[in-house]
Amino acid sequence: MQAHDHAAHGSMLDWLPVALIVLLTLAYLLAAYAQRQQTAGWSVWRSIFFSLGSLLIAIAVAPPLMAWAHHDLVGHMVLHLLIGMFAPLAWVLAAPVTLLLRALPQAGGRRVVALLHSRFVRFVSHPVSALVLNIGGMYVLYLTPLYALSLHHPIVHVVIHLHFLLAGYLFCWTILAEPDVSPHRLSLLFRMGVLFASIATHSLLGKLMYGYGWPRGTGHSLEEVQAAAQWMYYGGDLAEVLLAVVLLTLWLRTPVERREGVLESASAKPKTSV
Amino acid sequence: MASYPASSVFDTQRSLWAAILMGIGVMAAVDEIVFHQLLQWHHFFDFSTPAFGILSDGLLHAFELLAIVVGVFMLLDLSQRKRLSIPWAQAGFFLGMGGFQLFDGVINHKILRLHQIRYGVDPLMYDVVWNGAAIGLLLVGVWLLFRAKHLARR
């Protein structure tokens, strides 16, 4: 029942995730094309970001790479980074929820809005919840026998990767709180604080895995676990610095008068300027 | 800086602090690239580090990464507002670099014992050079700070 056996047999079912991603991307692009005919339009950049995110996920879930990730822990980390950090960031920048709301007829749109305002969505879309789901999920996966379990149970394996994607998306969205409007109006400083906690906890996890040889019971050598832990440490750094750069780039793009102060100093009030 | 009307358009304090953050981040990056990756003198994980050390290392690491990003964007913001004071930023950059180097040399290496500069040798000489360089950078920063204040007064 292991993924590399499937890949060897070329099972069509293994391509299902790729097919789903292709369909989702086509739906996005069609909706975006329809919006371009309207007066409001739709930025080409958003379509590019969505396609980029989809491409990264498609690469990560393609059977040959999944097979590699299955027996090589470094491979697993690379795919994890693609599915859980880089692809979600690109998708968030594509504003898929805004596009969905514009594309749906009024009744459907109202239902989506009701869902967005539901208690559940409000709860999970708080940056702290997203942080716990995202990094907390990683602690549970790698520091318990869950990872070893996922290698032998395809359902667990699929659920874990879906969790990476959704939690990663949620985290990027709640930190940026843009371009899809966030249900929470939290200050830039607060969101930077959550990002800080995320970097600290994921680098701590990388060190714990390296130092104590987690995940255990997978048959991987200690050297391989340590190489994977370093990939997680540096790759995660790269992803989170990228998120910080995107966050502050969006901040710098808002006009000077409406820009929120970071480490606001008394003399920085616009009134005293030239 | 109400007492120096000539410099009132510049936000000297913010220029200084933004550059300090950037200096900290640059020095941390140099440490990571040169000593961890290129020379491989420092270890990724020192098995004699106490648990508290590993935790504080994670927090410090997060601070260093964000410091360089936040510092650069604060400087860009000041520059867009035409309130960036270059002399104060220069002073801040050196103070940040030297301050971080000294912190790393004293707190990280000696008090928290995260890792040593180099293994298999007596670290004393390395510590002296490391912290001496830090003090050198700090002195340059202090000199630039006096110069910035002097320029503001004129």
Image: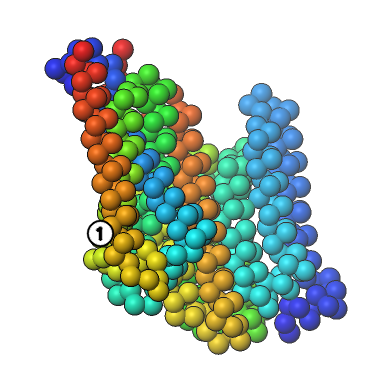
Q: Nearer the viewer, residue A4 or B44?
A: B44
Residue type beneath disc 1: Val
The residue lying furthest to the left in this view is B3
Report the colour scheme. Answer: rainbow
Residue A116 to residue B9: above or below: below
Seen at 52% across and 67% down, the residue is A230
Residue A77 visible somewhere in the drawing:
yes
Q: Tell me if mark 1 has few (under 14), some (14-19) or many (20+) residues whose alpha carbon lies within 10 angstroms of its own.
A: some
In this rendering, would B2 be left or right of A129? left
Residue B141 to residue A57: above or below: above
Seen at 48% across and 35% down, the residue is A250
Q: Nearer the viewer, residue A156 or A266?
A: A266
Q: Position of residue B4 (x, y in %)?
A: 18, 16
Quadrant, the N terminus of chain A: bottom right
Residue B54 to residue B96: above or below: below
Quadrant, the C terminus of chain A: top left
Seen at 23% across and 18% down, the residue is B152
In this rendering, would A187 be left or right of B110? right
Q: Position of residue A47 (x, y in %)?
A: 68, 39
Give the quadrant of residue B68.
top left
Q: Position of residue B140 (x, y in %)?
A: 28, 36
Seen at 31% across and 48% down, the residue is B133
Residue A271 to residue A126: above or below: above
Report helix, strand or loop for mark 1: helix
The residue identified by callout 1 is B106
Residue A271 visible somewhere in the drawing:
no
